[in-house]
Amino acid sequence: MSLQYRPEIDGLRAIAVVSVILFHLQVAPFTGGYVGVDVFFVISGYLITSIILQGHRQGRFTLLDFYKRRIRRIIPLTVAVYAIVLAICYFLFFEKQYASINHVVKSSLVFVSNFLLLRKKGYFDPGMQENPLLHTWSLSVEEQFYIIFPLTMLLLLRYGGSKWWRWLVLLALASFTANIIVTTWNAQKAYYWPHTRAWQLLAGALLATGIWKDAKTKPTGNLLSLVGLSLLLFTVLFYQDGITYPGLRAILPVAGAVLLIHRAKQGTYVYRLLSAKPVVYTGKISYSLYMWHWPVWVFAVFFSVGPVSPLQKLLLIVFVFLLSALSYRFIEQPFRTKRAASNPYIPWAILGSSATLMVCALLFIDNKDGICRKEYAAYQSQLNAYGDKVWEDISELEQRNIEDYKQLKPYRTGSDTAKPSFILWGDSHARSLAPGLDSLGRATCFSGYVLSAPLSPPLSGIRYQDDKRQLSTFSQSALEFINTHPEINTIILTARWPRYYREPYLAAEKFRDVRDAGILKWLQHDNEQQILFRKGLMTTLNELNKLGREVFITAPLPELKTSVNEMLVIEKLQGMTHNHFIASTDEYNADNNALLKFFSSISRHANILPIGTDLLNDTAFLYNMRTTPVYRDKTHLSAIGSRIATAHLLKYIR
């Protein structure tokens, strides 16, 4: 039932997988390399449909044979990668993160990891970038297609009439429409859901039906294949991870893949490129490349203190290619031979290995914080020694406020006898400053309020991605609280500013106009995040300025270069100390350059407090970094760190 081999399709696989790898390794300018997954979907739809149609014409197609072939093609490498990743994570990661990865393994083995990962966070969220099995979502989408589509095809071929392919057209249109609607409503769901991705697989399927005739002339084939390659390269080089995707933008890479599969035939310039031996070989090992590259990258980042250098990235790419070549030769190929295909026990042995891995994942769900359990216990003991009551009390209050932000209640901090003189408003970074304000307030007799909510910066007129907690209502209620307390003249705005300035978290706002709509919007590839951030913050400042309040904005707080988990593991294995994991002043300024310039440009609306550089130049802070847990996690100060930070804060506002 094998098809005629087409080397140019392996060449197209090579472009897709290399694009994904370079995007994941953050190699400029491949900012849209994630569209390589869309190309894989088109190729899969085309090949699977071609196999079904050829087998049906020959009267030899059966669902059982089809699924056996998929088992031999997919599962051996999947089990090998998952087993190795799970074993490494068992020793490296803390309990909660290991349990999360363990759940991904189990969900992927039953083809539903896309739904599990969707419930966690978005694909481009930085927290998800630490998951070595994040990329398995696309495998689950394909596997769901493999389960449902062959049966659908058999039903259409039997009962769909001579124009049965029209039903595929209708299904593709329905999926594409769902993709547009869901992307507008919730881009994360559209990214992961199979029914919003099905149209990409169906685009390849329709191509395999033969309804689109071959080009009659060689120049036409050359032109259309070049157009297809141009569309694909345009999206790889000019799309960014900050844009809304998939939606309408996904048309371009899908159209490019369809044109290349259909028109890059023998004799065309693009065929010569795609069928070159190095390109074809890269396509042949593309499945191994896809499976191995992301875990290798995540573990490399885990052991890196700071950014991975270009030379290190090059070495990683070479390593991934060598590993994938070995994986293809010794794991993939043995299960694709005629001998393996004719052995009736092979599929059952493969499924047995998958079941064994599932049992291991169920048995070893608790790793007790890996190799650093003692070090982590000591770190936690030090944290507890300095007290976390204020942090914990505010956390509990935030959970109660989530139930109804219209009844927002602030946290009173500082002296019980002094009249409140300020409001600290922000996200969890405001919460992390509260213990220091409380301690200093009780010592020097001043008090104020804390208005905080997780992942909610003090930006007004903003809608958030997947805003189940109504965070926009929190901002409105915070402004109303400030308005009803005219006796408080000082407002301090703080948040993990770089997170909201750079990363796709803000979704939409009330400032849209006609120019944002239609084709201009979906072709636009500039990151909209900065625009939304600036407008949201300026709206907040204008509201506060109208009320006549004095406004302060804290510059970004310094963060650890790694998580506490990574820090403790690296310290144990390499003999480092905590102070190796904090940025220098120059690194801090370089990382936050664009944001600090924006803050400087709005200084007439608010006082900008350089608390970040103050801390990094504070000998007490740097000394404590060596000996005490100044951070409770990668981004939040501990109680002792908060006390040092707020001492700098108070010298500006008192």
Image (cartoon, rainbow, N blue to C red):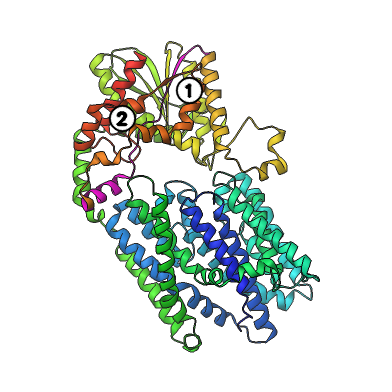
Q: Residue furthest right?
A: 216
- Viewer-side residue, 605 vs 343: 605
Q: Residue at x 52, y 75 (%)?
A: 70
Chain part drawn in magenta? 547-573
Q: CA distance from mark 2 to mark 1?
A: 20 Å
Relative to 364, say whether 483 is above or below.
above
Question: Which label number is shown at residue 600?
Answer: 1
**Residue 523 x, y percent position in the rendering:** 67, 45
Relative to 75, say whether 414 is above or below.
above
Q: Residue at x 49, y 81 (%)?
A: 336
Q: Secondary structure at mark 1?
A: helix
**Residue 134 x, y percent position in the rendering:** 45, 56
Q: Confirm or deny contact between disc 2 and disc 1 (CB under 8 A).
A: no
Q: Left of 175 or right of it: where is 394?
A: left
Q: Quadrant of the N terminus?
A: bottom right
Examine the image and state in which quarter residue 629 appears. Answer: top left
The reply to whether residue 334 is visible in this rendering is yes
The reply to whether residue 457 is visible in this rendering is no
Question: Badge 2, how many Cα within 10 Å: few under 14, some, many 20+?
Answer: some
Q: Which amino acid type corresponds to the residue marked 1 in the rendered image? A: Ser
**Residue 127 x, y percent position in the rendering:** 42, 47
**Residue 518 x, y percent position in the rendering:** 72, 42
Q: Residue at x 32, y 46 (%)?
A: 305
- Viewer-side residue, 483 vs 19: 19
Return the residue at label 2. Answer: 616
Magenta-colored stretch includes residue 551: yes
Q: Earlier in the sequence, mark 2 or mark 1?
A: 1
Q: Which amino acid type corresponds to the residue marked 2 in the rendered image? A: Leu
Relative to 244, say whether 478 is above or below.
above
Q: How many marks?
A: 2
Magenta-colored stretch includes residue 645: no
Q: Secondary structure at mark 2?
A: helix
